[in-house]
Amino acid sequence: MNYREKSYEEIFEVALNNCLEKGLISHADEFMSYINNHEDISNYYVMDKSVMSFLGALFYKYGLTPTYESAKVEYAGGFDLEDIGKIAGIKRPAAIHAEVDCTFALKDPIDEDVEIPAGIIVSTTNGLIQYKTIEDIFIATGETETTVSARAVIGGVSSNIIEHSISKIVSELEYNLSVTNNKPSTSGREAYTDDEYRYLIMNHRKIEIKGSNEAFEEYLANFDGLDSYNLVPNWDGSGTVKVIMDPGTPEQLNRAYDDLQNKVSQTSQDIVMCAADKKTIDIYAVVNVDIDQINPYSEIEKENIKARLISCIKTFIDGGYMNNGRWYPGLYLGEDFIPHKLAVFLDIEVPELKNIDFTYPTGYVKISDEEVGVSNNITIEMI
C-alpha cells in the first residue's frame, strides 16, 4: 500500500463519520460546516475529536512523512540523503575551492634565481581571505616576476575575489616580493545541494562504470578551481574523449589528465585535454539616465554611473560580486553573450539606468562549446 500523508480535515471527517455511525453524535455535516466557518462548537466530544485530529495531522507531517521519505532517494534530504549516498558509495561533493593566478614580483633586483616551494600563503589587504600557492615560484636571474596558481584556504563562494584583491604575503620569505592577482578567481562553489546530490546518487551505477560520461562528470564536479567544462565523446571518431576546461590553467590540465587516466577512464581510452579558448567581447552602448528625471544628473554623477556600468558589465561577462554581496559567475563555457540578458542584469545592479542601446554588438555573440566569453573594450556613451 502506498503511503499518503493525511490532512486534519481528512482525519476529522473520518472521526465524525465513525461517531455518527455509532450514534455518538448526529449531523456530521453540520459539525464540519461549523469547523470550516470557524464557529463555536458546544459539543465537548466533537471538540475532543477535533483536537485529536489536529494532533494526528501533526504526527503525519512531522513524524510519519519524514520517516517514510528518509529512506527514499526521491524525497530524502540533508543527513538522510547522505546516509543513502553512503550505501551507494557516493559522497556529497564538498565545497569547491576557488583558485587564482598570483603574480609575484621582485621589489629589488637580485643576481640569482628565486626558487620558493609551493605552499606560500597570500591574502587580501584585510587578511580575511587567504590563498595558498599550489605551484613552485621560480624567477630566473634577470627576470623580475612570475605567475603561479594559488588555491583558497577555505572552500565555497566566500573565498571568491575580484582582480587586484591579493596584496599581502603572509608567509615569511627571504626575498622581498610583492604579489597581486590580475584576474578574478575561478570556481569557488558551495557543497552540492540536495537535488544536485540526489542526481549523483540516482546515477551511481553509471558513475561506477569507468569511462562513462557520468564518471567524468562526477570527477569534474569535485575539481577545485574549475568554472565550467565540456565533454566531447568520440572526438576524433575513435573513442577519444576531449575535455575542455575553463579556465584550464596548465596546472589544472595536468592534474585533471593524471587523475582521469588513473581513476576515471578505461585503459583503452584516449583523453585530450585543452583549455577553453577566450573569445573577447567588445561593447559600445548608449545610455540615458535622465528620462523621467525632474533634475538631470550632473556630469560628475554621470561619470560615476558610467564607471559602475562598466564594472557591472565586466561582472556579467567575467564574474564578480553583485550589489547584494552575492558572487556572480559570469559567462560559462559555451554560453552565448546576449545583450538583452546584460540589460536585465544592469537594470537590477544600476537602478539609475533608464535606457540602454547597444550599438555594438547589435545582436547576440555566438560562443562555441570550446570558447568562453571575456570582456575586452567596453565603451559607454552617456547622453
Image (spheres, grey):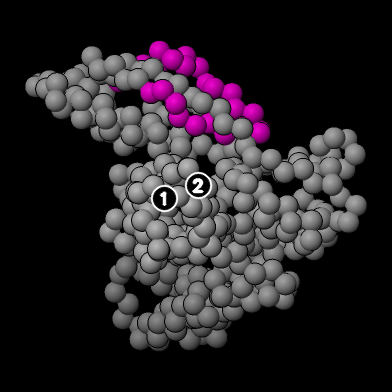
Vertically, is 264 above or below 357? below
Callout 2 secondary element: loop
Q: Which residues are magenta?
A: 355-378
Left or right side of 311 for 342: right
Amino acid beneath label 2: Thr
Q: Is residue 89 left or right of 50 when viewed as pictured?
A: right
Which one is in front, 209 or 132? Answer: 132
In the image, residue 19 lies in the stretch drawn in magenta: no
Q: Quadrant of residue 77?
A: bottom right
Label disc, if present, on residue 141 of the rendered structure: 2
Report the residue at 69% width, 40% height from top: 274
Q: Is the Cβ of the residue at disc 1 closer than 8 Å to that at disc 2?
A: yes
Q: Quadrant of residue 239?
A: top right
**Can the viewer see residue 80 in this picture?**
yes
- Identify which amino acid the numbered label 1 is placed on: Ile
Quickly name the residue at label 1. 110
